[in-house]
Amino acid sequence: MPCTVVVGAQWGDEGKGKIVDALSAEADVVARYQGGPNAGHSIVVDGGTVVLHLVPSGVMHPDPRCLIGNGVVVDLARLREEVGGLEARRLEVRSRLGLSPAAHLILPYHRAAEAAAERGPGAIGTTGRGIGFAYRDKAARTGVRVADLYDRELFVERVDRNLSRLRLEYPEAAELGTMSGAALLDALEETAAWARPLLTDVGAELHEALARGRRVLLEGAQGTLLDLDHGTYPFVTSSAASAAGAPLGVGLGPRAVDRVIGVTKAYATRVGHGPFPSEMDETLAARMREAGEEYGATTGRPRRCGWLDVPALGYAARINGLDQLIVTKLDVLDGFEEIRVVERYDGAGSEGGGFGADARSLERARPVWRSFTGWRSPTTAARRWSDLPPRARAYLEWIEGAVGVPIQRVSVGAGRGCEVTRG
Ligand code: IMP
């Protein structure tokens, strides 16, 4: 399949980094299509963990071209730091990395305004990276794109106008008073010169790669339930995290996509505020958090933990048009005596037993649970479906039946190769 989208089927943190790294062994190009440094894609290689925030997760393999599409919001200083960190590991990055000049920049005033907004009522529990405010400028047509770094007059004029507006909106954000377009551009000058050779027409490159039969992976960040349109609004991120955002965020048409893979944990987590109907009580959540090391890769925040929400997964299958599922972190459930899932919803707010993403309705929907007896044996060494304990297989087979999407791969450990691939 020449063009594959890898998308989070939950609230992010599904383990997309590990999966994109695994699939990248057979990819020629890997491109990020949305989000920004709010993402934290972890890859365990040679016993060490690398966390990628902006660089596509194909970078840990020596060959794939890595592209950052127009749909991404870029904090250039962070990108440079990340590339520096990878180069310190003796990875060749710059010659393989491409950046769309149409990607919007995250600037320090986006973070300052977000910090002020998050102190007020209606806080979302964001990652504090300025994501929402950068996308807000993009939608309001007041944003500054990577290309604009090289047009001093335009940059300074636009940034000064944005600053004037934000100072009125957030008078309590004192840092805004000390910023100016000229000073921000001066501070970025060296980084802008560093980034210039990376600029490329991402859409044209991908189009050509596909025309030549190359294999392309489009890497999603966050997850379907955090999608701006289809997630649990307003407790979402500000971009099109679902699969439809993939061609849009790299400059391809929808017909370019051949296959959509959804990644889900064998249970569920969420960071930030918002409804989470399958959330566990704190005693069990603490146990799950420790077993699964469920702390934010970007912010270090403890993640909220819950059981798998099957109607939500069915919803993600529909929104993304999933062809297959990859289940991660099955091994985290190895020690649990009982494993539960939300089988359907009952009562007001549920859509015929299914999942409706509207946050207020979801608060009212009552989960109906199904219980499975735990397999209570280690799965980490399993590599074939038949290596899995029968109860683990029964759990997975029930899920694929309920969601109506085949499970193609199951991850049973953080390291490369710790997975069961179905023949
Ligand atoms: P923002 O993307 O920083 O604006 O945060 C909006 C919401 O998305 C918050 O609930 C965040 O915790 C959540 N979020 C953003 N990025 C990620 C991610 O990579 N993984 C999980 N949650 C995320």
Image (cartoon, helix red, strand yellow):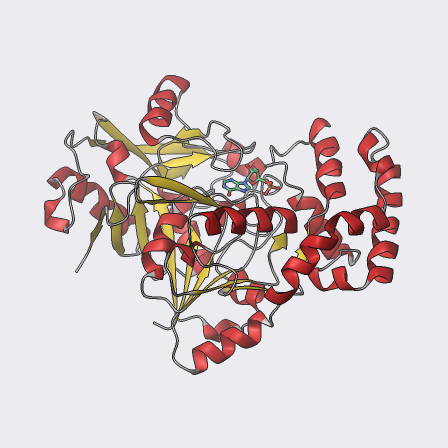
Which quarter of the rendered picture does the N terminus lie within?
bottom left
Residue at image position (62%, 48%) is 238
Q: Is residue 177 left or right of residue 21?
A: right
Residue 137 is situated, as x and y percent measured from the top left of the image, at 75, 52
Q: Residue furthest bottom?
A: 211
Q: Residue furthest top?
A: 283
The answer to whether residue 353 is seen in the rendering is: no
The answer to whether residue 22 is seen in the rendering is: yes
Which quarter of the rendered picture does the C terminus lie within?
bottom left
Say above or below: 150 vs 327: below
**Front in this rendered view, residue 399 or 101:** 101
**Front in this rendered view, residue 26 or 326:** 26
Q: Quadrant of ligand 1?
A: top right
Residue at image position (28%, 33%) is 332
Residue 33 is situated, as x and y percent measured from the top left of the image, at 54, 59
Residue 138 is situated, as x and y percent measured from the top left of the image, at 72, 56
Say above or below: 83 vs 359: below
Q: Is residue 11 left or right of residue 172?
A: left
**Front in this rendered view, residue 64 or 158:** 64
Say above or below: 150 vs 346: below
Residue at image position (12%, 39%) is 389
